[in-house]
Amino acid sequence: MPGDMPAPYLPRHVAIIMDGNGRWAQQRRRPRMIGHRAGARAVNRSIDFCLERGIAALTLFAFSSENWGRPQEEVDALMKLFLGALDREVDELDRRGVRVRFIGERSRFAAGIAQRMENAERRTAGNAAMALNIAASYGGRQDIAHAARQLAEQVAAGTLAPEQVDEQALSRHVALADLPAPDLFIRTGGDTRISNFLLWQLAYTELWFTDVLWPDVDAGLLQQALDDYARRERRFGLTSAQVATAPTESNSQ
Ligand code: IPE
Ligand code: IPE
Ligand code: MG
């Protein structure tokens, strides 16, 4: 329920690498796609959980720039799953006040999928209960390179001086620039790496890893992550004593 946890201890923005679908299926001697389908149900559970807890923003890594290199059959099946989910879920998300956005290289998707992404964004643009960001064909390095190119274009056009190219300027051009950076990062599936997810945005995010495979994720596990987050001290380079004198500041970046 929203409000059980004092606001400074509740992450405003949670970012998740949903990993382990393939292994979940393998353990059951089923094709990998069965794992992806079960993973889609875990996506719904996670959205429900975050809405109920009053989390303002949820960013899910659905498909990385590198995932295009998987066997064509798996990529095709994932695209089909993606399309089905877009058709099925957008009404319900809209009804619940969720604002849906996609980050990543949209031009790499087939026109039908790109069109549905745009429709979902347009349809839910006015919603404010929660921002749901789906990273699809997303790569953190690509995101930073794209931001750098935009600044370079402004410099070339004479609208930005080279000395104005700084952290703030770059921050304004990476994905999700209008949201607070993720407070909490979760990766399921047992691997402890970032895999080219939000590289810039995760600079001071609290990282949380679990061996649980993505299709097995439920509210209890997500609550464990929130509870663990609430116990951490975020120092942002300061000393513990400094943070203690300004307790609400520790969460304000
Ligand atoms: C994550 O699960 C989903 C995508 C990358 C699309 P995986 O498919 O990577 O599952 P594992 O890591 O092989 O178990
Ligand atoms: C990261 O998972 C990307 C997504 C969950 C969409 P991967 O399974 O692709 O990551 P690696 O290859 O193990 O680093
Ligand atoms: Mg994986």
Image (cartoon, grey):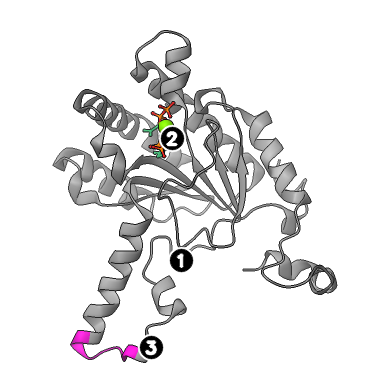
Q: Is mark 2 on a helix, strand or loop?
A: helix
Position in image of residue 102 (x %, y %): 35, 49
Earlier along the polypeptide chain: callout 1 or callout 3?
3
| Displayed quadrant of residue 171 | bottom left
Check disc 1 and report the residue beneath it.
Answer: 178
Q: Residue 2, relative to residue 205: is it above or below?
A: above
Residue ID at (46%, 9%): 28
Residue ID at (32%, 69%): 147
Q: Say the numbered circle drawn on residue 92.
A: 2
Position in image of residue 13 (x %, y %): 57, 53
- What's the distance in space between the residues labelled 2 and 1, CA to CA? 24 Å
Q: Say the numbered circle drawn on residue 164.
A: 3
| Displayed quadrant of residue 112 | top left
Which residues are the magenta region? 156-162
Position in image of residue 18 (x %, y %): 47, 35
Residue lying farthest left? 111
Q: Which of 75 and 41 is in front in this view?
A: 75
Badge 2 local density, few (<14 within 10 Å), some, or many (20+)? Answer: few
- What's the distance in space between the residues labelled 1 and 3, CA to CA? 20 Å
Q: Which of 21 and 190 is in front in this view?
A: 190
Q: Which of 147 and 194 is in front in this view?
A: 194
Badge 3 local density, few (<14 within 10 Å), some, or many (20+)? Answer: few
Location of the C terminus by quadrant is bottom right
Q: Is mark 1 on a helix, strand or loop?
A: loop
Q: Which amino acid does label 1 sit on?
A: Asp
Location of the N terminus by quadrant is top right
Position in image of residue 85 (x %, y %): 34, 30
Residue ID at (56%, 23%): 216
